[in-house]
Amino acid sequence: MTEISIISPLILFTTFLAFPLLLLFTINFTKTLKNLFPPKSTKIPRAYPIIGSFFSILSNQRRRVQWIAEVINSTGNLTFVLHRPLGYVQVFTANPSNVEHMLKTHFHVYQKGEISKKALADLMGQGIFNTDGPTWKFQRQLASYEFNMKSLRKFVEIVVDTELTERLVPILSGAAAHGGAGGGAGVDGGVLDLQDILQRFAFDNICKIAFGYDPEYLLPCLPEAKFAVAFEESVRISSERFNSIVPLIWKIKRILNVGSEKKLREVVGEVREFARKMIREKKGEMGEKISIDSLDLLSRFLNSGHSDEEFITDIVISFILAGRDTTSAALSWFFWLIFKHPRVEEEIVREITAGAKCETPVYDEVKEMVYTHACLCETMRLYPPVPVDTKAAIQDDVLPDGTAVKKGTRVSYHPYAMGRVEKVWGADWRLFRPERWLDRDPVTGKYTFVGKDPFTYPVFQAGPRVCLGKEMAFLQMKRVVAGVLRRFTVVPATGEAFEPVYTADLTSKMMGGFPVRIVERPASDDTTY
């Protein structure tokens, strides 16, 4: 009996370790079999017992978003079920009726889910994007104070405008005049990485408006951003967890503290320490409680009665993720698309110039940039900052298109695929055509914006969880567009040959950055800043 009692646990432990090692071996081995499983197949992937559609998922791992979109759009109801290993299933949909069902009419059924929460817990904790119920409602209600008209006007006319005129424009001007000389993290031989520059710009902005703190990442020297590097790595590894083919592997690596999980622990530690430092400095600045209307977002949370520093840290990190990565991603794709479409750029410049001549306040000027607004919507139709959003059903349900959903099933709506549905956008959906968002008065020539309902175009989510910062994001982006295109032309460093690759962790980006050269517009264009 003694020998048996000793041997049995050893067998169990060996089996526990052998299973993930076998899976790792299988992953490495099957990388040599890609010719047998073409990565560009648009058919619903074949599923096998135990391993599900493992081979198809693996062979399309590097273009996961595009592959899922192609499969979705090959189906009649814009919905399909992906079978993951070990019996897990995930529903993907681009059907607007299903999206409305998930985000509005059956909102109570579709929540974040334990898989998502656990995968993102180390980075985001109980932040607003990784929680449900009372914790989510509390954060959303308190954050909503930050998005009234008074705050939006302050954001555009003070925060964004200052960052634009004192930091972004001088850097672009210096790059145009001196070929980028002077070095810095985003400059190399006359070439700027515009994606990096825009991330720095957005990061300074969100920290200043939400936390009353200026990290000064967009100084002329483009300082080494230790936090930004750690944040980027944290998001990447957390996203790999979230999209893991076999989640058991990352969980075991986490227990053993090896590989990517060891790295995640290190970089998340740096990110959370940065956030804690910001919180402590804010506490030091705050004296007696003052009117909540005069507080920034961080001060409101600190004055709300919550003393748990880790919870406030979760909130800070969530808002950094939202404010830094989404607008910078949209703007990166925007500047590439208008380079590819000179006619569109000319129309934007005309709109900017006309607005400047009216001498209206900055806030009112950007509000009236209808054509630019349409261009940004068209950009995010093709390249949404958040290409996929996932919920989990807390009870059995049936989607409007007839798809059965069992309790615990992950259901993902897919904005990237939804921007490519021919029945919605027409046979020319591949084209960048801002006019699909506009009506034009035949007499005055004035444009009127015509939007889509949020369940057909859920780039900012919809229903109770619709993005609070939607208006703020548009105002920021339009102010950047006006400030940049009034003086400069943005040209990819390799010209017409540049074809960026869309990739996504939790948010999207251009793989490898966006190398550009900055060209001053001729003075005759009457577009001086």
Image: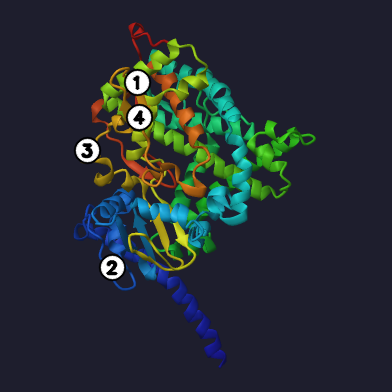
Task: Give the mark nearer the N terminus: 2 vs 4.
Answer: 2
Q: Does the rendering let one see residue 489?
A: no
Q: Within 10 angstroms of label 4, few (less than 14), some, or many (20 or more) residues?
A: many
Looking at the figure, which quarter contains the N terminus?
bottom right
Q: Which residue carries the number 2 mark?
A: 47
Q: Which residue carries the number 4 mark?
A: 375
List the single residue furthest toward the right.
Answer: 288
Looking at the figure, which quarter contains the C terminus?
top left
List the single residue furthest toward the bottom.
Answer: 1
Q: What residue type is labelled 4?
A: Cys
Residue 96 left/right relative to 111: left
Place of residue 515 in the rendered image (x, y in percent of width and height, measured from the top left): 35, 29
Can you tell which quarter of the image residue 293 is in?
A: top right
Q: What element carries label 1?
A: loop
Mark 1 or mark 4, whichever is nearer to me: 1
CA distance separating discs 3 and 1: 24 Å
Residue 446, which numbered label? Answer: 1
